[in-house]
Image: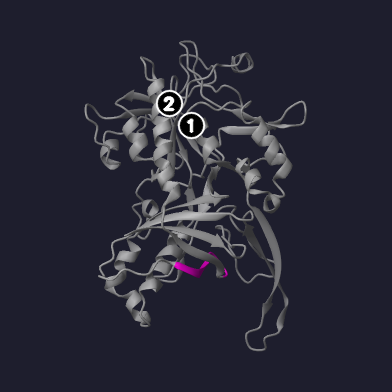
Amino acid sequence: MKKLLQIRPVDSLLIRDGRPFDNSPGIKASSMNQVPSSVVAGTIRTLLGKSYLDGEGDRFKGEPFNWIKKSIVRGPLYEWGDRVFYPIPTDISFELNEKDKLQARFIVPCKLDEDSGYLGTGKEGRHENMWPPVSHERGGKARKVPGFISAELLIDWLCGHATPENWREALDFWAENEGDLMFLSAEQRRHMHFLSPFTLEERIHVAIDPETYLSKDQALFATEMLVMPDGMTMLAEVESQSPFQRDIEPISTLHSIGGKRRLAQFTEIAEPLSWLEAHAHVRKVKEALQVKKAGADQYVKMVLVTPAYFAKGWKPRWLDDSSKTTRDFNEVFNLVMDDKRLVLQLRWACVDRWLPISGWRYSDMQEKQVRRMVPAGSVFFFQVLAGDPTELIEMKWLAPMSDANRRKGSFDKEDGFGLAVWGVWEPGEIQDGIKEEAE
């Protein structure tokens, strides 16, 4: 059974981060700036369980419902104006030009020559020929920058066709209309290729005495609520194997999500548009890779669209100490190569600070330990040393690349952590300023 669900928040959402929240006066429940995959996966599994209930609540706790815990969820992807939007990759920075207009800059690793080490440290430098310098340093951001990019622009960027000049018109349109999304016409929405980051709305509350139903003295507290743009929904695919003969009716109901039981509308979609479009996206990326294939070195990059769990912190377990894919890499990700195994060499990575992911464990009513996740938008640059990467791009498009968590109770791949898209890249040219500074 495979279903694609569209989740439309009715209320602003409380997506708690890992900071403590107790009964201290004046404390604030802080919210994350995006919806983690585990929140969506847990909500969908609860929704599936309730859909099979027939009035006997104890049935949900029995052995027949263990299949719900093992269901695989992929998501969330964000949809606005019937188009999918992805988090901005971290190797794209935004700056103001001399005309006070927003412009994009792409950061790419440079090809090392025989006299270069890490930022020009020389032949004896640490990690020589592994971590090259970049085309330019990541500059300071402008005050207002986009948080999401449309699938159309992202695919052009993944295929190597995008340039900062091509994005100038789209960035100008976003800067002029980013605060008036609800007033845009259908035609104008098609020209909107960037969206602002989600806003956090702070609310002040007062604790209520459960016996007198009166407010307590000196018991004010605050909550941060995540507010999505008007008209934005989330998409999530769920795959499960039900042992029951009957099929449940198509899902269309209100259900709580996140903290404080905030409501959202869950609707099953007959045509899984986002994943069907993925086939066209994969074809474009494969064509771009084949164009660059003629006798030259091949380079691919992995972009995370949901946070990922990696056993080595920012680095996946499927990379060894020399940052090459391990011998069991093909077996772990079910890659069957016709001639020889695929070998990738990590050349560079653009990763923001770690993301705290926690949760609540209902089995023993305890908080889950906070884990450090690699945030969505992180980019990993690989050079292909052996094999054909086209199968990797085709089979692992929007597939989880997280490591298997060996701790009991965590199902990162099954929850949709580490969904990735793939692209091509070419080494850039070292700027003279970076060479001089490094030397």
Which callout, 2 or 1, points at the residue further toward the start of the chain?
1
Is residue 63 depicted above or below 40 in this figure? Answer: below
Crowding at dot 1, Cα within 10 Å, few <14 / some 14-19 / many 20+, comes out as many
Q: Is residue 329 magenta?
A: no
Within the image, what quadrant is residue 105 found in?
A: top right
Closest to the observer: 240 or 250? 250
Most frequent secondary structure within the magenta stretch: strand
Closest to the observer: 151 or 399? 151
Q: Are marks 2 and 1 in contact (CB under 8 Å)?
A: yes
Under tag 2, what secondary structure? helix
Q: Label 2 belongs to which residue?
A: 288
Residue 51 in the image, given as x and y percentages of width and height: 39, 72
Query: How many labels sit on residues?
Result: 2
Crowding at dot 2, Cα within 10 Å, few <14 / some 14-19 / many 20+, comes out as some
Outermost residue, left direction?
339
Disc number for residue 115: none
Q: CA distance from mark 2 to mark 1?
A: 9 Å
What's the residue type where badge 2 is placed?
Ala
Residue drawn at x 25%, y 39% is 331
Outermost residue, bottom direction?
212
Q: Is residue 98 visible?
A: yes
Within the image, what quadrant is residue 401 found in?
A: top left
Residue drawn at x 53%, y 19% is 428
What's the residue type where badge 1 is placed?
Leu
Residue 17 in the image, given as x and y percentages of width and height: 56, 57
Quadrant that contains the N terminus: bottom left
Quadrant that contains the C terminus: top right
Is residue 161 depicted above or below 374 in this figure? Answer: above
Residue 155 in the image, given as x and y percentages of width and height: 49, 35
Q: Which residues make up the magenta segment?
A: 252-260
Residue drawn at x 44%, y 19% is 129
Q: Label 1 belongs to which residue?
A: 158
